Image (cartoon, rainbow, N blue to C red):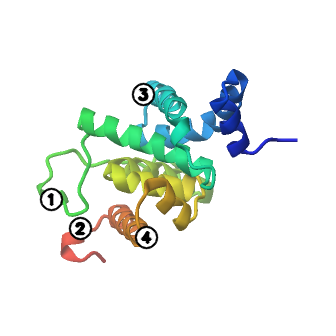
Amino acid sequence: MNASDAEIVERCLSGEEEAFRILVQRYERPVYGLIHRMVASDDDARDLTQESFVKVFRSLDQFDPTRNFSSWIFKIASNQTIDYLRKRRVQTISIHADPENDDRPEIQLEDSAPGPSGEYAETRRRERLGELVQRLPAHYRVAVELRYSQQRSYEEIAETLDLPLGTVKARLHRAHHQLRAWMEGTDLEEGGR
């Protein structure tokens, strides 16, 4: 029988080394996936995943067993990654930016398929969407990742990010609106299509 996360945390706090290994095994891939989609670098994602688990280990005594452990660990990982992105000053685009006055190169995707293929077009659309998600500011990117890649509810995202539910909904709405505008090639300042 699988022990609950809260039980495993309790075992960790009592000094059982194997218990923390169990937590790492349970959450390493999802945490890595969250971080990787935020930084788009294998090396950085591995480093940040390791740093996140170190922080989790050091903070286990602060975990509230009445809360959801996965939300708590994702909060630590996303905060760790946002801090990293801020320190690196990764270039992001404000949703209020004017793309016509932006000196950064546009993402150009050339269609090399001989004709319209449903599967090919969908693959290219997903690739483009993934590239555009990377252009979002980190706080939007985290919300998008938690909602669509991690399949988290709005409430879980609010708990993970320690934000009001309305803020989570607003961030996802703004991110969705920005991504749609980019996909359609419209300028938000002009009101879009």
Residue type at tag 1 = Glu
Please name the residue that numbered disc 1 is placed on. Answer: 100
Residue occupying image coordinates x 71% and y 37%? 8
Mark seen at residue 155 = none
- Please indicate, yes or no, whether residue 17 appears anywhere in the rendered image: yes
In this rendering, the label closer to the viewer, 4 or 3: 4
**What mark, if any, has residue 187 been given in the picture?**
2
Give whichever of 73, 141 is nearer the camera: 73
Eye-nearest disc, 3 or 2: 3
Q: Quadrant of residue 91?
A: top left
Q: Residues within 10 Å of mark 4 (few under 14, many from 20)?
A: some
**What amino acid type should be assigned to the residue bearing mark 2?**
Asp
Give amino acid for label 4. Answer: Lys
Amino acid identity at mark 3: Asp
**Nearer to me, 192 or 95:** 95
Whether residue 25 is visible here, answered yes or no, is: no
Mark 4 falls on what kind of element?
Answer: helix
The numbered mark, 4 or 3, whose residue comes first in the sequence reads: 3
Cβ atoms under marks 1 and 2 closer than 8 Å: yes
Q: Can you identify the residue that label 3 sits on? A: 44
Q: Determine the secondary structure under disc 2.
A: loop
Return the disc, 3 or 1, that comes first in the chain's sequence. Answer: 3
Compared with residue 95, is residue 89 higher up or lower down, i.e. above or below?
above
| Quarter of the figure that contains the N terminus | top right
Foreground tag (4 vs 1): 4
Q: Mark 3, residues whose alpha carbon is within 10 Å: few (<14), some, or many (≥20)?
A: some
